[in-house]
Amino acid sequence: MSVDNLPAWADLLASILLVSGALLTLIGSVGLLRLPNLFARIHAPTLGNTLGLGCVLLASMLVASIHAERLVFQEVLITLFVVATSPVTTMLLMRAGIYRRRADTSKNAMDRPPT
């Protein structure tokens, strides 16, 4: 079976998953641009990172499984990698923001004249 001969139900489902993933990623990107500071912005890309990528990987897994005529699990490895690394990246960015806020606060306190 070639990719051109996908069943209509699989083609429709894969299309819906791809469009949903694209919309979720777009919403996360717009949230990243619109939110006011680092601590609010850090939550917006997680929407696109988890749900958007999950929809795209499910569509890829569906099409690859139908094309190979067996269950394909390579996308599961990609999902596990993203799920394992995304929280670590978020925690490192939050710690950097907290450290920077503390450094800015202490710098501003040193610049003020004593009262």
Image (cartoon, rainbow, N blue to C red):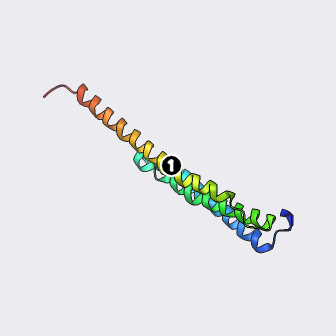
Residue 6 visible in rendering? yes
- Residue at position x 29%, y 34% in the image: 105
Residue 58 image offset from top left, x and y in percent = 66, 63
- Residue at position x 44%, y 43% in the image: 92
Q: Is residue 48 left or right of residue 35?
A: right
Q: Quadrant where the C terminus lies?
A: top left
Which residue occupies the foreground of this view, 36 or 96? 96
Q: Is residue 66 left or right of residue 77?
A: right
Q: Is residue 79 left or right of residue 12?
A: left
Residue 18 image offset from top left, x and y in percent = 68, 61
Q: Is residue 30 above or below residue 7?
A: above
Residue 114 image offset from top left, x and y in percent = 15, 26
Q: Secondary structure at mark 1?
A: helix
Which residue occupies the foreground of this view, 25 or 94? 94
Residue 19 visible in rendering? no
Callout 1: few (<14), some (14-19), or many (20+) C-alpha neighbours within 10 Å? some
Q: Is residue 44 above or below residue 108?
A: below
What's the residue type where badge 1 is placed?
A: Leu
- Residue at position x 51%, y 47% in the image: 33
Residue situated furthest bottom in the rendering: 9
User: Circle 1 sits on which residue?
Assistant: 32
Q: Quadrant where the N terminus lies?
A: bottom right
Write down the quadrant of residue 113 in the picture. top left
